[in-house]
Image: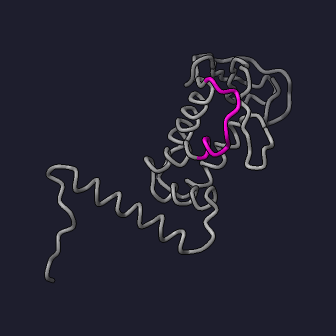
C-alpha cells in the first residue's frame, strides 16, 4: 500500500479491526519513510449492483458518488461525517441485500431523500432541489410547505407537546 503523503510503497499495519459494515476490515498503517499514519479499508469484492440511469445507461453503484452528493447537501450543517457514512452504509447494504442486481437511479435517490428527510430538513431540501430538478422558486415553496405541514402534524401527534405560545408583549 502506497503512502498517500509521500508515495512510498513501504508501509506497515499498526492496527486492524472490523469495519463498520460486514465483511470490512479497517487498518491503520504507518509509512516507513515519512512516519505518517493513515487508514485503509478492505472490503470483500461483491457482485456489482448496477444503477439504471434515466437515459437507460447502466453504471456500477458508486459509494463515493453517493457520499459526495450527501456531503454536498449537508455542507455547513451540524451533521457529522459518521452520520453521513451511516446513511451511505445503510443504502449500500439495502441494495446489496436486495435480490435485484439492477436498480433504478430513482430508487437510490429516494432512499437518500428519505434518509436526509429524517436527518435534517435543510440538507433534505438541498438534495431534493437538485435530484427532483426544481424548476423555480414555486417548487421550493411547495416542498417547504409540505415540510411545515409535516412538522405541525408530528407536533400535534406528540402528547404533552404544545405549539408555539403567543404572548402579548
| Residue lying at the far front of the rendered structure | 56
Q: Quadrant of residue 104?
A: top right
- Could you say where residue 161 lies in the image, as x and y percent from the top left? 18, 54
Q: Nearer the viewer, residue 16 or 6?
A: 16
Q: Is residue 116 magenta?
A: no
Q: Residue, x 54% and y 69% (percent of image)? A: 139
Number of numbered callouts drawn: 0
Q: Is residue 107 magenta?
A: yes
- Could you say where residue 60 lies in the image, as x and y percent from the top left? 76, 34
Q: Quadrant of residue 97?
A: top right
Q: What colouring method underlies this structural image?
A: one colour
Q: What is the quadrant of the C terminus in the image?
A: bottom left
* Left-right relation of 137 to 10: left
**As drawn, 162 above or below 44:** below
**As drawn, 160 above or below 32:** below
Q: Nearer the viewer, residue 11 or 140?
A: 140
* Left-right relation of 155 to 11: left
Q: Residue, x 62% and y 23% (percent of image)? A: 99
- Could you say where residue 133 lies in the image, as x and y percent from the top left? 64, 62
**As drawn, 19 above or below 67:** above
Q: Residue, x 28% and y 53% (percent of image)? A: 154
- Could you say where residue 145 lies in the image, as x and y percent from the top left? 41, 67
**As drawn, 130 above or below 9:** below
Q: Which residues are magenta?
A: 99-109
Amino acid at each position: 500500500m502506497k503512502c498517500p503523503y509521500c508515495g512510498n510503497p513501504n508501509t506497515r499495519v499498526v492496527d486492524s479491526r472490523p469495519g463498520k459494515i460486514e465483511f470490512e476490515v479497517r487498518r491503520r498503517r504507518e509509512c516507513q519513510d515519512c512516519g505518517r499514519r493513515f487508514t485503509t479499508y478492505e472490503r470483500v469484492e461483491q457482485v456489482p449492483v448496477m444503477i439504471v440511469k434515466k437515459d437507460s445507461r447502466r453504471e456500477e453503484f458508486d459509494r463515493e458518488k453517493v457520499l459526495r452528493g450527501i456531503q454536498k447537501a449537508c455542507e455547513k450543517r451540524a451533521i457529522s461525517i459518521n452520520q453521513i457514512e451511516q446513511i451511505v452504509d445503510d443504502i449500500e447494504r439495502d441494495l446489496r441485500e436486495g435480490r435485484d442486481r439492477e436498480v433504478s437511479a430513482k430508487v437510490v435517490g429516494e432512499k437518500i431523500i428519505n434518509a436526509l428527510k429524517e436527518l435534517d430538513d435543510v440538507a433534505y431540501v438541498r438534495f431534493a432541489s437538485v435530484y427532483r430538478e426544481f424548476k423555480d422558486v414555486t417548487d421550493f415553496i411547495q416542498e417547504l410547505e409540505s415540510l411545515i405541514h409535516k412538522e405541525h402534524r408530528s407536533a400535534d401527534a406528540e402528547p404533552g407537546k404544545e405549539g408555539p405560545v403567543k404572548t402579548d408583549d
